[in-house]
Image (tube, rainbow, N blue to C red):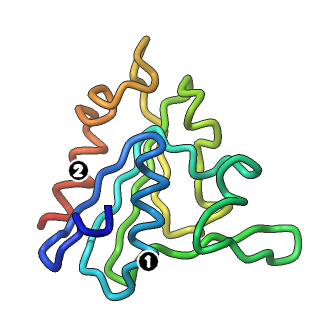
Amino acid sequence: MIAQIGEDTRVVVAHSLGSVVAYEALCALPGHQVRALVTIGSPLGIPNLVVSRLQPAPVRDGKAVRGAWPGGDQLEWTNLADLGDVVALVKDLRPVFGERVHSATVSNGAHAHDATSYLTDELCGRAIAEGLA
C-alpha cells in the first residue's frame, strides 16, 4: 500500500480491513500530501482486536487509548459506518483518534457492509470531492 501513495495522491478511500492497512500506511509516511482519508465499514475502533495491534502503537492516556493521527494538519478523515455493519462494530472513531475524525452513520439497507453501498452514499462522495478540490 505504501508504494501506491505517491506525491500526487490526495485521497485515500479504504473499506473494511483495508482501512487498517491504509491507516498504517499513512502513519508510516510522514509528510505525505494526502488531504482526505475516507474509511468505510472500518473495524479501526474495535479495542482488543484492532486498536491494540495498530502500528504505530496507540498511547495510553489514563483510561483512554489514543491512536496516532495519520497525517498532517491538511488531512481530513471521514469515517462512515452503517448501523448494521458488524465489521464496523465501533461506529464512532473519535474516542480513539480524536475529535478531528468526521464520523457519520449511513444506511446501506440490506447490504450493510457492501463497499458499493458506501461508495454511492452522498457523504462518501462529498468527502472524496472535498479532498480533490
Above or below, comparing residue 105 to residue 60 in the picture = above
CB contact under 8 Å: marks 2 and 1:
no
The residue under label 1 is: 28
Q: Position of residue 87 (x, y in %)?
A: 56, 33
Three-letter amino acid code of the residue under disc 2: Arg
Residue displayed at 36% across by 68% down: 76
Above or below, comparing residue 40 to residue 85 in the picture = below
The Cα atoms of the two marked residues, 2 and 1, are separated by 26 Å
Three-letter amino acid code of the residue under disc 1: Ala
* Numbered circle sitting on residue 126: 2
Q: Position of residue 5 (x, y in %)?
A: 24, 69
Q: Is residue 46 left or right of residue 32?
A: right
Residue displayed at 20% across by 62% down: 130
- Dot 2, crowdedness within 10 Å: few (<14), some or many (≥20)? few
**SS for tag 1?**
loop
Residue displayed at 41% across by 47% down: 18
Give the quadrant of the C terminus: bottom left
Residue displayed at 39% across by 86% down: 30
Q: Is residue 63 left or right of residue 49?
A: right
